[in-house]
Amino acid sequence: MVTGFLGAGKTTLLRHLLLNSGQRLAVIVNEFGEVGIDGDLLAACGFCPEEEQAGRLVELTNGCLCCTVQEDFLPTMKRLLERADQLDGIIVETSGLALPEPLVDAFGWPEIRRHTRVHAVVTVVDGEALAAGHVVGDSAALEAQRRADPSLDHLTALEDLFAEQLEVADLVLISRADRLKDGELACVEAALVGKLRPGTAVLPMTRGGVDPDVLLQLNRPDPADHDAGQEDHHHDHGHAAMESVVIQRQGHWEREALEASLRRLLADQPVLRLKGRLHQQGKRWPLQIQAVGARLECWYEPGGSRAEPGMELVALAAQADAAAVEAALSSL
């Protein structure tokens, strides 16, 4: 789920993800009125064959999604899930006025929960505007968007809505980072951190250029490719700003204790993305582990085989933080 005010850079981010993820993604775009995000920009980027666009790009124009969850969002999700075998994932882009919490809650509905997991709630913020002391770059356009939505049943002040977008975020992306002067980016980051949940990562972004692995499936080296029984640490330098750490260990861990340890680690360490498996004695299937920021999801599912009980983890972190993340994972 991608949230953020009008003009923050959500569409640019989506175009980058659609073109560079290597995945079959569907997109729900919350567009309405005269100033909404133009779905044609996404369609024109050529992220999928033209004959597939109708099933992979859905524009909801009846108003702010958080106010029309039952009427628009849930039926749309059900239709997309009927084609789940043809998709790798779904991106939901909210309008600039949407309260993110109702949409996050909607993924807990039984008919959706059985088929989906929320990888991350990503909040895009305008770094240039924040550096100038504003939460939005074009307040007049945002107010026009507010007036264009007849279904809007919340009149949250912009500062309060911004706070809610930050509180629910698993990852915050600062757009237009290249336009900030020396020291401004650090000031913006420092101002944001105090408004976030522990473990929420903050990354600068220029023209939507974020490693898709941070937001989507982590396509770094698979721990299963390493020899079982060995503890291994691997660093991937394929991305200029990111580094992956692979840990493989034998041993016994109880699910509840491991999840508690991982939650503490994610709250304390700058882990951007985490995936892995726990192989437990007596369990038919491994415990799948996925996290973005502090959001941790664990479930039993087929995938990966191993003769002995043990754990495999791959973490993605900024290169400057990789050593600390590796040490923390090794101490589990």
Image (cartoon, rainbow, N blue to C red):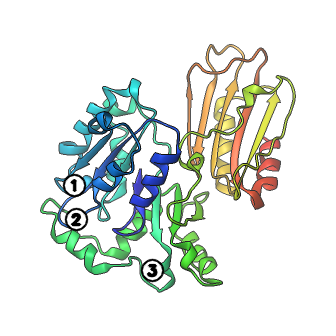
- Circle 2 SS class: loop
Disc 3 packing (10 Å; few <14; some 14–19; many ≥20): some
Q: Which mark is residue 258?
A: none
Disc 1 packing (10 Å; few <14; some 14–19; many ≥20): some
Residue at the disc numbered 1: 67
* Dot 1 and dot 2 residues touching (CB under 8 Å): yes
- Which badge, 1 or 2, comes first in the chain's sequence? 1
| Residue 214 rendering spot, x and y as whole percentages | 59, 49
Q: Is residue 99 left or right of residue 288?
A: left
Given the image, on which type of amino acid does mark 1 rest?
A: Cys
Q: Residue at x 29, y 65 (%)?
A: 97
Q: 124 above or below 23? A: below
Q: Residue at x 21, y 69 (%)?
A: 146
Q: CA distance from mark 3 to mark 1?
A: 27 Å
* Of marks 2 and 3, the one in the foreground: 3
| Residue 210 rendering spot, x and y as whole percentages | 56, 56
Residue at the disc numbered 3: 129
Question: Considering depth in this image, is 175 or 149 the residue closer to the camera?
Answer: 175
Q: CA distance from mark 1 to mark 2?
A: 8 Å
Q: Residue at x 50, y 65 (%)?
A: 207
- Circle 1 SS class: helix
Residue at the disc numbered 2: 154
